[in-house]
Amino acid sequence: MQVGDILRKKTARVETVRMNETVGIAAQLMPANNSRALVARGVGPVLLIVPLSRRGECPAPRPTPPGRFEHNVPEPLVAALTRHKGKRHLVIVEGIYSMDGDFGNLNELMDVADAHEASVFVDEAHSMLACGANGRGAVEHFGVDKRIRILYGTFSKAFGALGGFVCGSKETLDYLRFYSHPYVYSCALPPVVVAAILKALEIGMSRSELRSRLWENADHFHKGLTGLGIDTGSSTTYIMPLVVGDRERMYRLGHELRHRGLWVAPVDYPAVPQDKICFRACVTANHTRADLDEALNILSDTLVPAHLSQTQGAP
């Protein structure tokens, strides 16, 4: 089973280091001054040149002024594409936004991009194997897989390995093989890692019950968090921000949660705005209801009292 075949793309390329390669792909796809990359970020507007949707993936600034459009709102994208008519555009979005936990609005964004003859680059890092009837990611979930020119993902999430992949036309992939510097100067993945990736791909594509269980667990945990009054932002998936909004409180609570046996990743500025500083909870198919209920009990004992203390003005 090959990644390109599974994703119904003519060619796929496997990478060793995902983030460096993402930068290389975005930069090399838009090499000339007569091109722009328009990037959707998870929270608010962006002012970036050729990054993906996370700050860590931004290459060096370029001569062309950056594009800007609001996350999952098509009107600002229409305005940005219209304002810079005549340039080559690359619209870069995520299948699922890693900090917000909501889907990229691929149907509407694709309609806008197609109307302006812009290419679309979808990062499926957090949606591959977990979304769509066959695990092909958000593009399959929204039924736009045949409209996407280039698709990118990682092997470090659902695959449980390392590295990443990019899928697209043979011509695009041949171009990147020669001009994407992180790829040119990297080494092949170790055979044992490749074997693990292929096995994970086989399991992920053949065992749909794992996806069903994942979404059932996500729904259960979402309902529990809502019942506790915990702010999860715009999350609609198995990735859920637990908004704290204060750095000192977030790190203090983090130690308390670890002491109680619960690990939720702290997310600090500049990954999110300062008033959206949060923990990021990620539900998996292997969590049991007992696991999730215990996590909710711990959050009820820690995060909820801290929130009440904040709203009531206590120090």
Image (cartoon, rainbow, N blue to C red):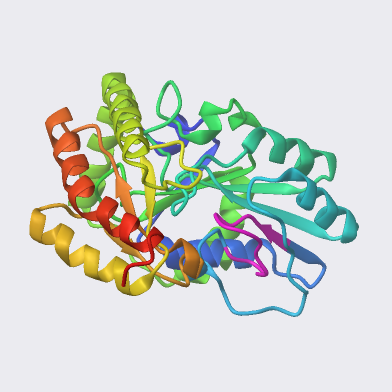
Q: Is residue 49 magenta?
A: yes
Q: Nearer the viewer, residue 175 or 3?
A: 3
Q: Nearer the viewer, residue 266 or 87?
A: 266
Label the magenta part by its dominant secondary structure: loop
Q: Is residue 191 left or right of residue 227?
A: left
Please indicate, yes or no, whether residue 310 appears anywhere in the rendered image. yes
* Quarter containing the N terminus: top left
Please indicate, yes or no, whether residue 264 appears anywhere in the rendered image. no
Residue occupying image coordinates x 78% and y 64%: 35
Residue 140, position in %: x, y? 52, 28
Q: Nearer the viewer, residue 218 or 49?
A: 218
Q: Which residues are magenta?
A: 37-51
Q: Is residue 264 magenta?
A: no
Residue 28, position in %: x, y? 62, 66
Residue 241, position in %: x, y? 39, 51
Residue occupying image coordinates x 65% and y 65%: 46
Residue occupying image coordinates x 17% and y 34%: 293
Residue 213, position in %: x, y? 27, 24
> Which quadrant of the structure image shows residue 225?
top left
